[in-house]
Image (spheres, rainbow, N blue to C red):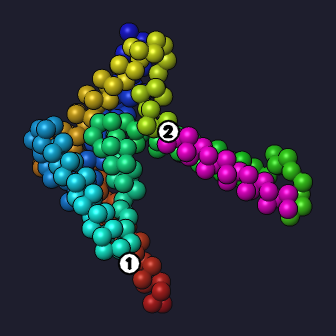
Amino acid sequence: MSIVFGAFFTVGVPVAVTAYLLIGWLIHNGRLQSFSSRKELDEHIKGIKQQKKERKKEQKKKKEAREKESDLAFRKWLQFGGGFYGTAALYTFVINEIGDIFRFLFKVLNIADWQIDWSLGGIINFLVTAFVEFLLNSLQNFLAAILWFMEWGEGDGGLRILMNFAMAYVGYGIGSRLASEHATTDNGHRHLWRWIESKRNRGEQQEIIEEET
């Protein structure tokens, strides 16, 4: 029973929240259409992946520079496969990356604990070493995200992995369905995205005013 509760709180709920926000944002900015079933959502995602493949082939034929997605979360989600698997992987990657970023900043900014030679070369060597460690940790986080089902929970390996898959699947279904319903009824995440966009627009307008003055 502890494995079930562990999978529910460490995988099921976070994946549901991630799916709700991610799918809601994709519907809001027009990358996805509202859907009435899981099958319809999967078809939309397959269409997006196919479009990306065709764009890459076309750019390769024309020898053009590949366009990168401006939305990092969307790009990572597709990189991890999309769907419930990609959502669980994205959530795992983000959590691990945030932890590493804070540890990196704490290590760099906590000058009192620097055990280095305080020459210019020593300081540069310390910063370079810290940055390389950060990059290696980022690679490890990517691999951990791919194997997200082994990352969360404790206990028997087989049962834990099974419950992680089950909770991720159910959480993704609930979160994505709510995202589509709220997009249709103009509730929930719609208000969040409009609030963020209004804040961003105010910031841009303020910058323009400051530049003109």
Mark 2: which secondary structure? Answer: helix
Whether residue 186 can be seen here? no
Distance between the alpha carbons at the discs numbered 2 and 1:
41 Å
Looking at the rendered image, the quarter that the N terminus falls into is: top left
Quadrant for residue 149, please give it: top left
Residue 168 vs 26, above or below: the answer is above
Q: Main secondary structure of the magenta part?
A: helix
Q: Position of residue 130 (x, y in %)?
A: 71, 51
- Write down the residue under mark 2: 143
Tag 2–tag 1 contact (CB < 8 Å)? no
Crowdedness near tag 2: few (<14), some (14–19) or many (≥20) residues, C-alpha within 10 Å: few
Question: Residue at 67% of width from left, 47% of height from top?
Answer: 133
Mark 1: which secondary structure? Answer: helix
Residue type beneath disc 2: Leu
Q: Nearer the viewer, mark 2 or mark 1?
A: 2
Q: Which residues are magenta?
A: 121-142
Residue 146 vs 125, above or below: the answer is above
In the picture, the disc for residue 52 is: none
Please check the rendered image and state whether residue 16 is part of the magenta-colored stretch, yes or no: no
Q: Position of residue 103 (x, y in %)?
A: 64, 44
**In-front residue for pair 10/161:** 161
- Write down the residue under mark 1: 205
